[in-house]
Image: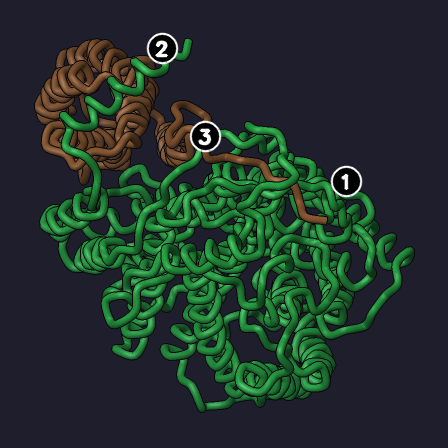
Chain colours: A brown, B green
Amino acid sequence: MKPKAIDVSQLPMNAFGHRSIMWWGGASLMLMEGAMFAMLIVSYIYLKGRSPEWPPGYFAPVLFWGTLNTIVLAASTIPNHFAKAAAERLDLRSLQMWMCVALVFGVAFCVIRVFEFRSLNVWWDSNAYGSITWTLLGFHTLHLVTDVMDSTVLTVLLFVGPLQESHFSDASENALYWYFVVIAWIPVYAFVYLAPRLA
Amino acid sequence: MTEGIADDPRLEPSALAREARELANTWSEPRGFVGWFSCVDHKTVGVRFIVTAFGFFILAGLLAAAMRLQLARPDNTLIGPDLYNQIFTMHGTTMMFLFAVPVVLGFGIYFVPLMIGSRAIAFPRLLAFAYWMFLFSGIFLYVMFFLNIGPDRGWFSYVPLAGPEYGIGKRADVWAQLVSFTETSGLAVSVCLIVTIFKLRAPGMSLNRIPLFVWAELVTAFMVACSMPSIMVASGTLILDRLVGTHFYNHAEGGDALLWQHLFWFFAHPEVYIIFLPAQGIVSMIIATFTGRPVFGYIALVLSLVATAFIGFGVWVHHMFTTGLPQFGTSFFTAASIMIVVPSGVQIFCWIATLWSGRVRFATPLLYALGFFVVFIMGGLTGVMLAAVPLDAQVHDTFFVVAHFHYVLIGGSLFPLLGGIHYWFPKMTGRMLSERMGKTAFWLLLIGFNATFFPQHILGLMGMPRRVYTYPVEMQWGALNLLSSAGALTMFVALSIYLANVAISLRRGAVAADNPWGASTLEWATSSPPPPYNFVPAPTVGGRDPLWETRADLPVVVGLAADTREVLVTRLMDAEPDHRKEFPEPTVWPFLTAVAVGGLYIGSIFTPWAVVWGAVPCTIALIGWAWPRKGNRPRSLERQIAHRHRTAAEHA
């Protein structure tokens, strides 16, 4: 007897959210990156526990630039949200526009980040406190820069092609990853800026 | 999803043959020089992983043989202390980072997509990148070793010995960057495996029907994803300390050497389970096949895998019992370390129950599974002993520990892996391995292994420390060491026979049928070796042992395009068909990306600026990788989509 057939030829060629393999790829990546942030923060707590005073021998970082950047980062979720929604509606024009707006926020954030590093009041080779502070901020910056570059390439692609339908789910996952970078900033901000003040 | 149709014309034999030809054309790998570097087929990459890993296994084995030669008699002068330090570090580093982890992932890369009935692995280009990173890391390590810059601080590279103050030269940097290389590779593979297992299963293969080997690879991939970040942080901060003068591990400036041990073992203890869990998966497959019945206690076995993974993250401090940590803390880790015996015990009892109630065929793969029982249980028993702080304090850093972890790793991982190769060789090559040579190699290996490592327990109890290049005759350790070295020679002979068996059978072995062992899982449903597209027509599944449950009414999948690389994506829990996804073509860009990233890693040993300048080629390579070859202009795609919206609205 011949087997029966399940015909899948009418199924869509693209999916969003957790139906898509890109989403799961992004989620796995966030799990790993999140674990790295966690390990760095655990290291911070460990080193802090070893020191009788914190920050040892230096002033705490200046709050202004970091706080300004927190506001910029929080605001960047708005264009990001609209870009994600446009991608999921397969609305190319709207997606192009919101991706550009989101990019402006990303670049602004990178620029302000330079001032953040300059106002940490400590160098990476000053002592272990300086080392972990610079590394924590640097690791977040690495995510920021790679995501901005990634978004730039995707935005250019959206304007000049060649495009496939799957690029819309790429744009949606790109927005999701930006949310991750934003959320990861909250503990990083707390440890870089607030922990030296509370101790 | 459309209901099954009984008389689909696409299932006529002639139509299927035509489809197979077209699929072979679509999915075959490019030939020629560039084609060799462009390959993205999970089977080719999987075999590359396995073969490369065994290549490093041979190198590390030869290094072990050199150490056993040196230790065969007291006051030996064959190898000096400096070279000996490099050799034991290279041996451990190679076995852990370049053999054990890549080989278990390699088996997953090859067999997971076949076992779940998929056309391909998720993110095939990422997989290709992972392979090149792995290959480059090994070449890098051995080139450095032959230039006399091989790492020499032990495979866990403790600070301050490996720090800037005592670890002069570049040897510790080589170790740290080797780790960065291999972890990048391992993390990339784990993404591929997780997504493949979650989203590419054949329709009907709900979570409770996944083969146990695939469960083991899934749990392993999650362990990789959660533990390797810790060693990335560790090796990264070590490099920073050595290269740009940070003070993570510098006690004088508020750093702490124990932080290194915490970060290292938070990775390296789970790593033992990363190596061990897939091997347990192999044992489950072998035992089911050679008893002719489903494994007893499927749910219990799956839960044991998951429990082992969770507890495996809570035992790392038992490597640090002699560092003066508070007693209360160490008691917790003693309890956790003893607790992990429970899921291991559950597994062993499930397997024994399976053997008890099945019709056992003593073919070579099963012998390896039984050898695994004996050796691994002995390693487990010394493990329980070492979990107790007083005993650990007594034998810490002695040969007792060396004996323990070789029993666990060789018994728990190498035996099942060698059995797994015997088991799957027919599928991978289309030829059977010789049973006679296989059994000879097995018995010699079992005897040689015990002769090598059992005496080391006693040597450890007599006080012989690990990592010494020689010992004076007055210690009276000579006889047992000679026995141990003789055992190593026997292992060498056994593994040589094993390799000869592989080499000979590859050309002259008996031709294998599709399912020579009468096994139950989907990899045996396709030809040996499998075609590039794995299956035609794509299967669906109605139970845990699809090939033993011949259900004539079980439908097959039709309607996947044959002229593009279309793969069926299913839902996470019940594997209902969800959508189709076009998979990427072969490309040379992952290779170029690995070259660029590798250049950055190696350059950063010498100057921090390599990270800045190296980022440029990395970026170019990644753009080349991401840029699509074919597609539509933005406007035309927009028109297409608008058209689709309109037709959808009209239908509604």
Identify which residue is drawn at 73% across, 74% down.
B364
Does B598 sit above or below residue B410? above
Quarter of the rendering containing residue A133: top left
Gap between marks 1 and 2, in whole Å?
52 Å
Residue B542 sits above or below residue A72 on the image: below
Q: Position of residue A155 (x, y in %)?
A: 15, 28
Amino acid type, residue under disc 3 in the picture: Gln
User: Mark 1–mark 2 contact, CB under 8 Å?
Assistant: no
* Badges 3 and 2, same chain: no
Q: Chain of mark 3?
A: A
Q: Nearer the viewer, residue B525 or B296?
A: B525
Identify the image quadrant of residue B426. Answer: bottom right
Q: Which residue is mark 1?
A: B300
Residue in the picture at 50% in, 51% down: B268
Disc 3 target residue: A10
Tag 1 and tag 3, C-beta contact below 8 Å = no
Task: Classify mark 1: helix, strand or loop.
Answer: helix
Q: In what quadrant of the picture does the C terminus of chain B appear?
A: top left
Residue B429 screen position, x and y as percent: 54, 73
Secondary structure type for disc 3 = loop
Q: Tell me which amino acid carries mark 1.
A: Ala
Q: Tag 1, which chain?
A: B
Relative placement, left or right, of B292 versus B116 is right
Q: Nearer the viewer, mark 1 or mark 3?
A: 3
| Lower sequence index among marks 1 and 2 | 1
- Residue A195 visible? The answer is no
Is B463 situated above or below B198? below
Q: Residue at x 31, y 42 (%)?
A: B248
Residue identified by numbered label 2: B650
Q: Amino acid at mark 2?
A: Glu
In this rendering, which labeled residue sits more in front, label 1 or label 2?
2
Asked which quadrant contains residue B228, the reply is top left
